Amino acid sequence: MDINEFIFQIIILLTPGSLSLFIIKRFTTHRRESKVISSFNDLLAIIILTFISCIVLDIIMFEFLPAYYISSTKKMLTNSTYSYIEFTYLLCISSIMGIISSIYIEKKLDFKLLKWLHISNHFGEDDVWLHFNQISKGNWVNIRDHKLDLIYCGYIEQYSDPGEIRELLISDVTVYSNIKNSDFKSYCIPKLYLSRNFDDFTIEFIKMEKTDVKKE
């Protein structure tokens, strides 16, 4: 087996885990890491997810076809080739695993369980930016723009992943001046895109439902 064939076979063997990881990264928010750390973590996650997919397939197949089935987990560990049917089943299993894992991560089910058991009060985010935007959903906020000395009162519709540049899409926005006794006239706009460095603005949580503001 030459090196090109060996690399191609490794790629095929790890494709199920790669699919799961793609789905997880597509539908979850996460802290941005350095390329070296991210690459190592991704490779480790792909191997683990592929291994789990193979175990799930083995359990299912040995239950229904014990006499005719050769373990896909063994094929992965011995660098053997999947059959076409195995490969198709593994892609289906890994897709389902990716969706379930995304729900598990986004809902913070593990941290909720630990909090319910009074084991930990950790809120489950690597970054307070994510946690704040999660809890502010359905409520209004004041965003003080220190760069332009303006205040944006609105509803956070979307927000970026953690990083040096923080991006917000704000709906039903009223713009005020942050300077007292200013001649600036406030105005309303349906949407506002804001892109600032993490220390260029402050967000203030307003405990008031969106429907209540519209009634006023």
Image (spheres, grey):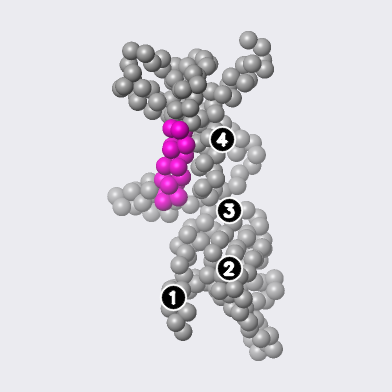
Q: Which of marks 3 and 2 precedes in the sequence? A: 3
* Start-end of magenta stretch: 92-108
> What residue is pinned by disc 3?
161
> What residue is pinned by disc 4?
42
- Counting other residues with Cα less than 10 Å from the Cα at mark 2, is it few (<14), some (14-19), or many (20 or more)? many
* In front: label 3 or label 1: 1
Q: Position of residue 181 (x, y in %)?
A: 65, 89
> What residue is pinned by disc 1?
211
* In front: label 4 or label 2: 2
Q: Name which residue type carries label 3.
A: Asp
Left or right for 175, reference 126: right
Please state which of residues 60 and 163 is positioned toward the viewer in this rendering.
Answer: 60
Q: Is residue 162 among the parts visible in the rendering?
A: yes
Classify 161 as above or below 11: below
Q: Which of marks 3 and 4 precedes in the sequence? A: 4
> What residue is pinned by disc 2?
170
Classify 183 as above or below 197: below
Q: Name which residue type carries label 4.
A: Asp
Classify 208 as above or below 54: below
What element does badge 3 sit on?
Answer: loop
Q: Which of marks 1 and 3 precedes in the sequence? A: 3
Q: Name which residue type carries label 2.
A: Ile
Q: Position of residue 180 (x, y in %)?
A: 64, 86
CB of mark 3 within 8 Å of CB of mark 1? no
What element does badge 4 sit on?
Answer: helix
Queried whether the magenta region covers residue 189, the answer comes back as no
What element does badge 2 sit on?
Answer: strand
- The CA distance from mark 4 to mark 3 is 18 Å
